[in-house]
Structure formats: structure tokens, C-alpha cells
Image (cartoon, helix red, strand yellow):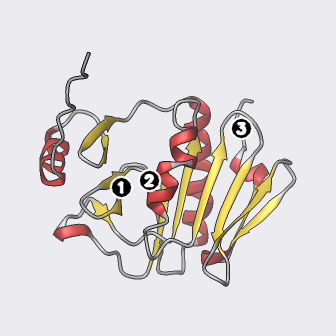
Amino acid sequence: MPQPEKKRITSEEYFRMEESADFKSEYHHGEIFAMTGASFNHNVIAMNVASRLHESFHDSNCFVLAGDMRIQADKSKHYTYPDLSVVCGDIEFVDGRDDTIANPIVIFEILSDSSKDYDRGSKFTAYRNIHSLKDYILINQYAYHIEYFFKNEAGRWSLDDFKRLDDTFRINSIDIELPLNTIYYRVKL
């Protein structure tokens, strides 16, 4: 039996819906996907990382942006709400909007059971289309594990894994060290 065809909407319709919605949704090639609430660990990790970055950016032109800032991953095709993002220098807003940026240099996603495949797969594939993006960091909220993807000198994406609480890694594009014991401070594993 044939499946009913999914209703696809334009990115303009998506933006109009988002302006009056009671919840956030991501947009992917004509479909929208409601965002779910976050766990305790997710929130603590996000605040730990945001606090560390915010303090480090005190005398710089960089901003750390929370999960309410939308990112254009692929023009008119894919819009997301990463858990945290970093922009340095002038912020490039999409189509005159003040709620969607096009030029993050670092994106953080905190993995959940429901999002980990998407965050590692099609979302990361879309993020790699963002010309300004230099670092993509996946944080496991259930175990000490950071997957640090970065553009190497040849312009290819490389990966470093960190799994010990006493590990520290340097985010190359913003020249900041981020210890795992800071990321996971007060997180209940």
C-alpha cells in the first residue's frame, strides 16, 4: 500500500511558524522536527562549557551562543539549534534576521540517545557545508567522552577522542583549552 506523501514546507514558512511556536523545531529539506527538552546532565554540561568560554572571551571579539540561537547549516534547506556555538568577529545573520547565524566557527552538540546518530551523521554532514566552521565538538552526557572534530591544515576533518576526566584538549580555532573535569563538573554519571 502506498505511503501518504509527507507535506513539505518552504524555509520561509518554517521561519513564520517558528516566530509564533511554543517550542523550537529544526528544519531539514522541507520537514520540521520538534526539539525535545534536555536532561539534567545536558543542562549542567552546557552551562559548564558556556561559562568557561564566556569567561575566556572577556577581552576578545568572540561570543558563545546558547541553544536558542539558530544556525543555517545549508541555505534554505537545513536550520538547526546546536547546544552551543561560537562566533568570532562580525556575526553574519541570515536574510536580515537576528535569530539565525551563518558563520559559527565552533559548534557543540551534547549527545542524547535520541540525537546521537543525527548529530554524528546528517547534521555533521550539513555542518561541514558551513564555510566558517573549524571545530565540531560532541559531548557524551552518559560517560566521559569527547569527540573533537577539527579542520586540519589541509582543510580535511580530523578526529581526536578524549575519555579520561583528567584529559584536556585545545579548541584550535579559538585557542582555548577545555579540561574534561570542567565540562563534567557536577555532572552525575
Where residue 56 sits, quadrant-wise, is: bottom right
Q: What distance separates the C-alpha of mark 3 from that of mark 1?
A: 25 Å
Where residue 176 sits, quadrant-wise, is: bottom right
Q: Residue furthest front?
A: 1
Mark seen at residue 119: none
Residue 49 lies, in percent from the top left, at 61, 54
Q: How packed is label 2: few (under 14 Cα within 10 Å), some, or many (20 or more)?
A: some
Q: What distance separates the C-alpha of mark 2 from that of mark 1?
A: 6 Å
- Which residue is at 17% across, 50% downward? 15
Residue 93 lies, in percent from the top left, at 27, 70
Mark seen at residue 69: 1
On the rendered structure, is 157 left or right of 8?
right
Q: Which residue is mark 2?
A: 66
| Mark 3 in CB contact with mark 1 (< 8 angstroms) | no
On the rendered structure, is 37 left or right of 142?
left
On the rendered structure, is 21 left or right of 41?
left
Q: Which type of secondary structure does the marked residue at label 3 adopt?
A: loop
| Mark 2 in CB contact with mark 1 (< 8 angstroms) | yes
> Which amino acid, mark 2?
Ala
- Going from N to C along the chain, the mark reached first, 2 or 3, is 2
Residue 161 lies, in percent from the top left, at 78, 55
Q: Which residue is mark 3?
A: 186
Q: Is residue 3 above or below residue 134?
A: above
Q: What distance separates the C-alpha of mark 2 from that of mark 3?
A: 20 Å
Where residue 129 sits, quadrant-wise, is: bottom left
Residue 134 lies, in percent from the top left, at 56, 73
Q: Residue furthest top?
A: 1
| Mark 2 in CB contact with mark 3 (< 8 angstroms) | no
Q: Is residue 89 above or below residue 18?
A: below
Q: How packed is label 3: few (under 14 Cα within 10 Å), some, or many (20 or more)?
A: few
> Which amino acid, mark 3?
Arg
